[in-house]
Amino acid sequence: MTTIVDDEDYNFLNQWKWTYDKCKGYAYRGKMTNKKQKMIYMHREVNKTPEKMLTDHVNGDKLDNRKENLRTVTIGQNNMNRHKLNNISSIYKGVKKRGEERYYARINNNKKEIYIGTFLTEVAAANAYNFYAKILFGKYASLNKCECVDFEQFRVRISKTSKYTGIVFAHGKWEARVSQVYLGRYETEKEALESRNSYITQNKFSSNRLKLQKWGE
């Protein structure tokens, strides 16, 4: 592993042997304090980070310890620049696939999840996330790298409602859902209801909220 530092810091840092922390991804060295081993992280050493504050790597590279890539932040500000986690159904941060033809965007702020909207394309949802991330987090925002599009043109808008639970009319067709399970899109409201009833019957749901509904009632 190789870390990047400024020329002016090279000789100072090179007087110690640095180790790569496989768990956290940082460069560190050991220091004995009161007969106890203490970990000194390179990014905090270079940035001269105060106690109870964190050091944020602007570009997300934890081994890029040039001063221009380091900034002192609070825990909340550091979370704003957190990059996408693995094992999510989209390649973009803040985007999750919903059914076969939908992507919805969401963003976390002050430990609360905010629903941004549902979109026809993954890229549109990523742009929507970027738009609100800039508003909420400013320079600390970790943005998706994607083609720029007008996400409002791809937003799914519901123009009709149904008296049946789990049935909505969106973008020209009727959609059926059971809780968070997306069943599909149908030409008629009746077809959507029949699909939902069939799914409930096959999976033997007994909850009152998931009871069968009769067409016309």
Image (spheres, rainbow, N blue to C red):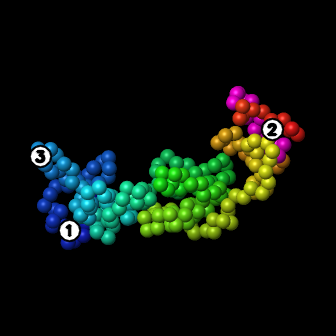
In what element is the residue under mark 3?
loop
Q: Is residue 102 magenta?
A: no
- Quarter of the image for the C terminus: give it: top right
Q: Which residue is mark 2?
A: 194
Q: Amino acid at mark 3?
A: Asn
In the foreground, 216 or 50: 50
**Could you classify mark 3 by the number of other residues whose Cα lies within 10 Å: few (under 14), some (14-19), or many (20 or more)?**
few
Q: Which residue is mark 3?
A: 34
Q: Amino acid at mark 2?
A: Glu
In what element is the residue under mark 2?
helix
Residue at (82, 42) in percent of width and height: 191
Nearer the N terminus, badge 3 or badge 2?
3
Please indicate whether residue 78 sits to the left or right of residue 188 in the image: left
Q: Is residue 190 magenta?
A: yes
**Could you classify mark 1 by the number of other residues whose Cα lies within 10 Å: few (under 14), some (14-19), or many (20 or more)?**
few
Residue at (63, 57) in percent of width and height: 117
Q: Quadrant of residue 11?
A: bottom left
- Magenta residue span: 189-207
Q: Residue furthest right?
A: 216
Residue 177 % position (x, y): 71, 42
